[in-house]
Amino acid sequence: MRGSPGTPAAEGRNLPMTRGFLSLCVLSLIGAGATGPTIAQQQAPSPQAAPPPRQAPSRIVVPAYTVIVPVTVKDSHGQLVGDLRRGDFEIFADDVEQHIGNFSADPVPLSAVVLIDNDLPDRAAGQVQKSLTSIAASFGPPDEAALVTYDQYPTTVSDFSSNNDKLFTQLKRLELGSHSDMVIADPTTAGPVVNGKSLPTATGVPLHGSKRYTETDALNDALYDSANMLKDRGRDRRKIILLISDGANTSHNTHTFDETLHKLQSSDISVYSISVTRSLPIGRSLLQKGTADIDKYAAETGGDTFYAAKQRDLERLYSDMTEQARNQYTLTFSPQDINPNKDYHSIEVRVLRPGLSIEARKGYYQSTMLPVH
């Protein structure tokens, strides 16, 4: 008996077809999964291109300028003081205290120009002539020295050398020029004459028409040329000019005092002078008010002035000068809070221990400082 569609028999007959339909649907879904994205894939956002790598910001390099300040410290007896420390010093630029960057009390090799006046008065020239070879003994193996003489023009006798034997030989061969400082009579100084014979007078030879020696020493030019020789020597060396002079300076220099001082200070050069016509030092008060040019050059550059009129004094002072220059304290600073519209800036060094005196350069020029990155 055939069952109706709602009977169990009818449901049994329809089961194979139902299973076949379901299988077909599953196969269709599998096929769709193999050839197209799933729902999850359809809902996932599409990948975006990676952002370009970020560039490092440009580095702004601000150069720091280093000022080197050699400092000599002496006690009340004029003896060098060598036991000070960084904390014993203060340094100011344009009256603003600066941080001391580097500090050293170690000896420094010298680069020196020995600059000798070649037109001294007769007596002074004789004393210097006898003492010349002692100059070589004041330099050690690490030092280097050049020899220059000057009168109206500077003359290089020998260039820089560390060979003391060579310097000794050059000094031994050097013949210094000189002049007399006596009054030279000419027709205007002669007394009255009758029949070709001089008549005696009660006053002697009048001096109003006398011929006195005219100075031709171009000190500014000699120092300027010496500074040119020294300016490119290493900053790891102490650059000095050892000047032996009577202090005469003609008004016919090519370079002015200020131009020469600028050259010396901008090249980190100190002038050490020996005055051969004064035996006693002048007072500090006079030095501050203005004295001979050799004194002012020494004071402004952080050097020193010595006084000698005898051979034995000269021989001792040569070594004293180089020893002082070699054993200065060395302070450095990078200027902070100074006026950027000025090129020249004053320097003042102070020592906190009482009873001591200081010699140091009086200023520097910003435009000539070397940058340190």
Image (tube, rainbow, N blue to C red):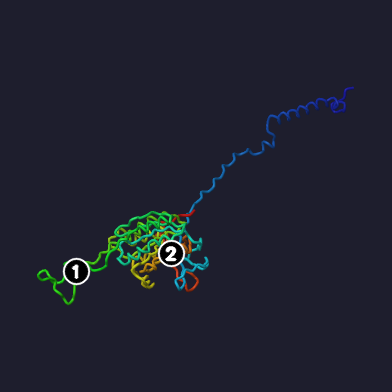
Q: Amino acid at mark 2?
A: Ser
Place of residue 28 in the rendered image (x, y in percent of width and height, measured from the top left): 73, 28
Report the residue marked by disc 2. 319
Q: Residues within 10 Å of mark 1 (few under 14, many from 20)?
A: some
Q: Amino acid at mark 1?
A: Gly
Helix, strand or loop for disc 2: helix
Q: Quadrant of residue 192?
A: bottom left
Q: Residues within 10 Å of mark 2 (few under 14, many from 20)?
A: some
**Residue sitting nearer the eye, 283 or 244:** 244
Which residue, as the protein is rendered here, is positioned at the far right?
Answer: 1
- Rounded to the nearest whole Å, what is the CA distance between mark 2 and mark 1? 44 Å
**Residue sitting nearer the eye, 26 or 215:** 215
Report the residue marked by disc 1. 209
Place of residue 308 in the rendered image (x, y in percent of width and height, measured from the top left): 37, 69
Which residue, as the protein is rendered here, is positioned at the far left?
Answer: 195
Total count of labels: 2
Place of residue 75 in the rendered image (x, y in percent of width and height, measured from the top left): 47, 72
**Residue sitting nearer the eye, 200 or 43:** 200
Q: Nearer the viewer, mark 2 or mark 1?
A: 2
Place of residue 244 in the rendered image (x, y in percent of width and height, measured from the top left): 36, 63
Q: Which mark is residue 75?
A: none
**Residue sitting nearer the eye, 80 or 169:** 169
Circles 2 and 1, Cβ within 8 Å, touching? The answer is no
